[in-house]
Amino acid sequence: MSRLRLLSTAALLAVAANSHATSFIVTTDTVVDALKSSSNATSDVTSSFHNNKIVLAARDDAASFVATEGAIRGAKLESALDYIRHQAPQLKATDAQLAQAILTI
């Protein structure tokens, strides 16, 4: 009977390890894709607006926006987002991506 339990336990551990590895791979792919799109927005924004006073003034608001996952939207951040979208209408980035980009400036 103990041999059957040992084999059952080994089989369960093998199945569990395989499912965790699969979940890890899916999670890793999702995170990498998100970082890739965020870095594209970041490079576009930082190269164009790194000396702009409106964008630089929005850093604290951008930090609050990112930290609260969009719950806090300050007036300076809203102004910077409007300015960026007006200056670069071809830029297809979310508010969160632009806020993260502002933080890297």
Image (spheres, helix red, strand yellow):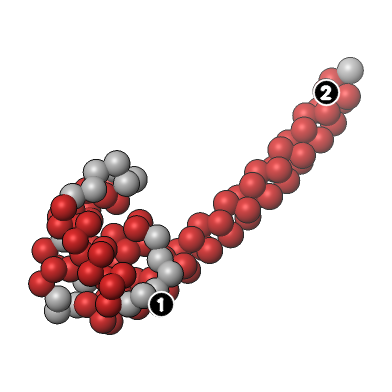
SS under mark 2 = helix
Q: Which residue is mark 1?
A: 90
Q: Amino acid at mark 2?
A: Arg
Q: Position of residue 18 (x, y in %)?
A: 73, 46
Return the residue found at the far bottom.
47
Q: Position of residue 28 (x, y in %)?
A: 56, 56
Using the rendered view, name the quadrant where residue 50 is placed.
bottom left
Q: Is residue 38 above or below residue 87?
A: above
Residue beneath the point at 57% across and 51% down: 27
Tell whether 6 sits left or right of 95.
Answer: right
Q: Give the quadrant of the C terminus.
A: bottom left
Q: Earlier in the sequence, mark 2 or mark 1?
A: 2
Q: CA distance from mark 2 to mark 1?
A: 62 Å
Using the rendered view, name the quadrant where residue 99 is placed.
bottom left
Q: Which residue is mark 2?
A: 5
Q: Give the quadrant of the N terminus.
A: top right
Q: Is residue 77 above or below residue 56?
A: above
Tell whether 19 sits left or right of 84.
Answer: right
Q: Nearer the viewer, mark 2 or mark 1?
A: 1
Q: Is residue 10 visible?
A: no
Q: Residues within 10 Å of mark 1 (few under 14, many from 20)?
A: few
Q: Amino acid at mark 1?
A: Gln
Q: Is residue 101 visible?
A: yes
Q: Is residue 64 above or below residue 42?
A: above
Q: Position of residue 96 (x, y in %)?
A: 35, 56
Tell whether 86 sits left or right of 93.
Answer: left
